[in-house]
Image (cartoon, helix red, strand yellow):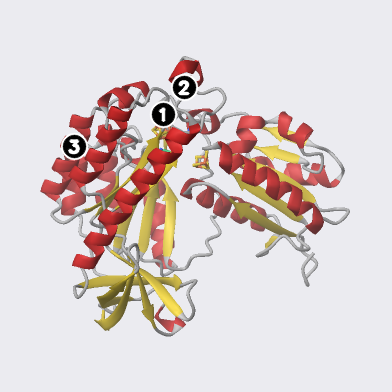
Amino acid sequence: MNAEGRPTVYIETYGCQMNVSDSELMYGHLEAVGYTPVGGPDGADVILVNTCAIRDHAEQRVLGRLGELKRFMGRNTVLGVTGCMAQRLGPALLERARHVQLVVGPDGYRALPALIEGARKGERATKVEFDLEEHYEDFQARRFDGVRAWIPVQRGCDYKCTYCIVPMTRGAERSRTLADVEREACTVAEQGITEITLLGQTVNSYHDGAHDFADLLRSVGRTPGIRRLRFTSPHPNDFTDRAIAAMAETPAVCEHVHLPMQSGSSRTLKRMLRRYTRETYFECVERIRAAIPGVALTTDIIVGFPGETDDEFEETLSAVREIGFDDAFTFRFSLRDGTPATRLPAHLTVPDDVAADRLDRLVSLVRDGTRARNLSMLGTRHEVLIEKTARRGGLLQGRTRHHRTVLVQGEESLMGKYFTVELTGTTGSTFTGAIASAGHALPLAG
Ligand code: SAH
Ligand code: SF4
Ligand code: F3S
């Protein structure tokens, strides 16, 4: 209980932005029925761990954390597990962790208040049915970031990439209506937020029956007060010319695309069931670059997928070199129970040491590329939005429209403001900069 005698809730979030956004929805929903959000588990009446199942490592971390959380629990504390791992493991999680009382998947958050009430009376419950209608439209997301907002536009995924657990943890793809997304964009703009990131597993396959992703970008991009519009993650196959034109023609849309490649080898991509080839991925990059000169490109890459030969891995390295990504998230393949990859013949498994070695080589290649590009940018000036205080002492952290991180000196009062910043140094991945002049006091229209 807090000082006013209201019960408190703490949500610890793992995984992708979609989970961060779901946690905001859960906080909002629980706040509406009388709970007060708190910033840590100590003394909280309700602790929820919003989990990720994408790689085994992510799940191991959560299992370890559930053990640690025991020491924050009093006699009446309710501990629940939500999110993708809850969906994947269901009742088995209640068996495995006896102090967990609730296991609730991504479509079950509407039931949380009732489930928590039950748990207070000693019940243990699992709720993991999918609900293809559920978008939580009537929830008021409780946002803690006053500068940027993440707005989910789509839930679930209809691709069936053979390595991926997400279709099993999030169910089939469905889009919110354009009107609902517009309404939320206006709400966050009225709160003074000027940057929006639209979220979906394959965000550019957005379709509400009447409007596609191009309509969505143009419409949200027109929200008064919204100066920067981003989205993540698009799928290469869903980048229509209409969508690319909408990006190029909507001033708010930032010059950055995170375009997961996964592999540079058409043969590996085929086993991954990514539904594009090296060549069509390159074509997609070319179309984006032609429409948006200077666009920053980042990506996701998996190494060690079953059957990946040395030659196939070399093709990934050459793709990274040829495309010249600004940055890449790189992962070692993790076999997930129930995914189609489990049915690939065992002899295709890439040995751990080979996969580890490939990851090292890929990471250095990406790092070298990023460092060279960043060094070449020193002395140039960029519009930076100050987002938060940096972990490094006394500095503020912001981003350029191209999504490059810049640390600057300044007072906390600069938070949420735009400045022209000269890049003065780089660690290789991030920049330090000096504020050259204040940006426009008012967000640009359009
Ligand atoms: N929907 C997004 C990806 C979501 S998961 C998309 O399709 O682009 C984020 C990233 O995790 C993926 O892009 C992939 O690179 C990585 N990933 C997913 N499953 C994985 C697995 N089983 N092992 C290793 N990496 C994985
Ligand atoms: Fe997973 Fe593929 Fe869907 Fe992305 S597109 S969430 S990688 S199945
Ligand atoms: Fe993880 Fe679920 Fe996101 S598996 S990456 S939290 S959709």
Q: Dot 1: within a 10 Å radius of its alpha carbon, few (fewer than 14), some, or many (20 or more) residues?
A: many
| C-alpha span from label 2 to label 3 | 25 Å
Label 2 vs 3, first from the N-terminus? 3
- The residue identified by callout 3 is 282
Q: Where is residue 393 in the image (x, y as percent from the top left)?
A: 49, 79
Return the disc, 2 or 1, that comes first in the chain's sequence.
Answer: 1
Which kind of residue does numbered mark 2 sit on? Ala
The quadrant holding residue 397 is bottom left
The label on residue 341 is: 2
Residue on which disc 1 sits? 305
Q: In this view, does 128 lie above or below 220?
A: above
Q: Quadrant of residue 209?
A: top left
Residue type, label 1: Phe
Mark 2 and 1 residues: CB-CB less than 8 Å, in contact? yes
Task: Assign a secondary structure to mark 1.
Answer: loop
Q: Earlier in the sequence, mark 1 or mark 3?
A: 3
